[in-house]
């Protein structure tokens, strides 16, 4: 196959003339600053806190069957450890986005111990 020349055909063919599909453009879109709610209810949070670092990615999981909040979004570390929730006052639009199939996640921006409460600030992102 002749892959010489220019244009779309040349773009789609690699060095050996094999068809190479371009990867879709992906980006992370910053949406909102908030904090992690419910950390004081997480067993072992004091032991976990030293392992949580600024910049760590956090995974979000919808919990539509949550008896306290139908828009609940659980937050876990990338290792799968639950550390709390997106605050109820902030989660309605995020829950709707996730229910529509959008991928949201967080990143730790700050943390501090306030008496027995560990306050963890996060940024919420949409992966598009």
Image (cartoon, helix red, strand yellow):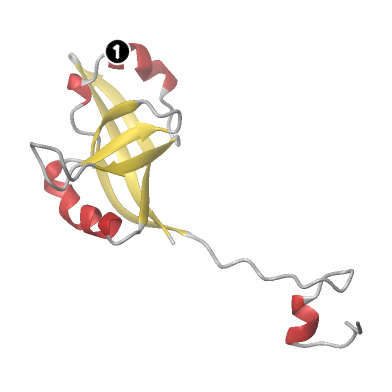
Where is the C terminus found, in terms of image quarters?
bottom left
Residue drawn at x 25%, y 19% as measured from the top left: 113
**Residue 16 percent across, percent down from the top left:** 89, 69
Above or below, 7 against 42 in this view is: below
**Residue 59 percent across, percent down from the top left:** 38, 40
Residue drawn at x 16%, y 48% as measured from the top left: 71
- Mark 1 crowdedness (10 Å alpha carbons): few <14, some 14-19, many ≥20: few
**Residue 39 percent across, percent down from the top left:** 22, 25
Residue in the foreground of this view, choosing between 97 and 122: 97
Which residue in the structure is indicated by mark 1? 44
81 vs 20, left or right, is left
Above or below, 99 against 59 in this view is: below
Where is the N terminus found, in terms of image quarters?
bottom right
Q: Is mark 1 on a helix, strand or loop?
A: loop
Above or below, 23 against 75 in this view is: below
**Residue 123 percent across, percent down from the top left:** 33, 45
Residue that protrudes farthest toward the left in the picture:
68
């Amino acid at each position: 196959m002749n892959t010489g020349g220019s244009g779309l055909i040349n773009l789609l063919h690699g060095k050996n003339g094999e068809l190479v599909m371009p990867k879709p453009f992906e980006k992370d879109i910053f949406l909102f600053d908030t904090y992690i709610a419910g950390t004081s209810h997480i067993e072992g949070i004091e032991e976990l806190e030293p392992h949580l670092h600024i910049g760590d990615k956090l995974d979000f999981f919808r919990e539509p069957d949550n008896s306290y909040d139908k828009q609940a979004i659980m937050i876990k570390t990338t290792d799968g450890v639950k550390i709390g929730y997106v605050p109820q006052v902030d989660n309605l639009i995020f829950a709707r986005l996730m229910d529509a199939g959008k991928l949201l996640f967080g990143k730790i921006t700050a943390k501090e111990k306030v008496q027995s409460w560990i306050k963890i600030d996060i940024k919420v992102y949409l992966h598009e």
